[in-house]
Image: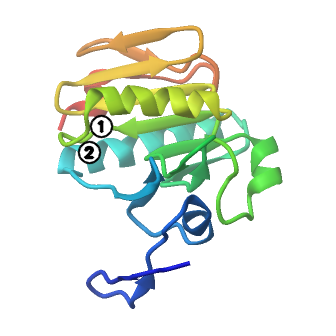
Amino acid sequence: MVTTSYKAIGQAALSVPDSLEAWLDNPLEGTEWANDHLIEKSGITVKHSRAQRLLSTLWANYQTNQALGGEVYTELPCQTNQQGRKPDIAYLTPELLEQYGNVKVVPQSAPLIAEIVSPTDLAEEMIAKAYEYLASGGQEVWLVYPEVRWIIVVTAESKQIFGPSEIAETRLVLPGFSVTVDELLNG
């Protein structure tokens, strides 16, 4: 296996993964493994960061207040059927947390995932990513568009778009959770 050096400001030189297996063994911060190569996650804006923090906090608070168990994560390393991903927000149920709570990379998608869409993300790629998560054990994917104030909730059976002043709600995971688009994406 041939590796090259990867160096970020303030970090020691790291080995750059050259395969999915190498990425799963060393999922570098700010990267995913997709389509047979290392992808740097980029294009994160203040709106993106705020939406990620707020939605992860809202999901975690709801999960705690409803005594549902499990755990909400940001940038959870997981393996889909063909890729290595780090969804912006992921919820692991108590059963999955017990099974995979101590692994380096979860070997499937989390049941509930949110991707906060950056201005540099292509719509087709985000939709493909949502279906990739669903095909790998995910049950529900939220595609959050801070710039246009949309939330698209995708399950195997339905796709719904919520815009300004509308209420987005979970369909299958974290039953009963809801948030207005304005509450999540204004700011």
Instruction: Please give the name of the residue rendered at 75% of the width and 50% of the height, measured from the top-left corner.
Output: 97
Amino acid type assigned to the residue bearing label 2 in the image: His
| Residue underneath mark 1 | 117
Residue 110 image point, x, y percent: 63, 40
Amino acid type assigned to the residue bearing label 1 in the image: Val
Residue 132 image point, x, y percent: 53, 32
Q: Are marks 2 and 1 in contact (CB under 8 Å)?
A: yes
Front residue of 46/80: it is 80
Number of other residues with Cα within 10 Å of mark 2, as a class: few under 14, some 14 to 19, many 20 or more = many
* 25 to 159, vertically: above or below: below
Mark 2 secondary-structure assignment: helix
Q: Is residue 83 left or right of residue 12?
A: right
Instruction: Please give the name of the residue rendered at 72% of the width and 63% of the height, measured from the top-left corner.
Output: 103
Say which of marks 2 and 1 sits in front. 1
Viewport quadrant of the N terminus: bottom right
Instruction: Mark 2 or mark 1: name the one nearer the start of the chain.
Output: 2
Q: Is residue 136 left or right of residue 16?
A: right
| Residue underneath mark 2 | 48
Instruction: Please give the name of the residue rendered at 27% of the width and 21% of the height, measured from the top-left corner.
Output: 150
- Quarter-wise, where is residue 76 in the image? bottom right
Residue at the farthest bottom position: 12
Viewport quadrant of the C terminus: top left
Number of other residues with Cα within 10 Å of mark 1, as a class: few under 14, some 14 to 19, many 20 or more = many
Q: Is residue 112 left or right of residue 6?
A: right
Q: CA distance from mark 2 to mark 1?
A: 7 Å
Residue 141 image point, x, y percent: 50, 28
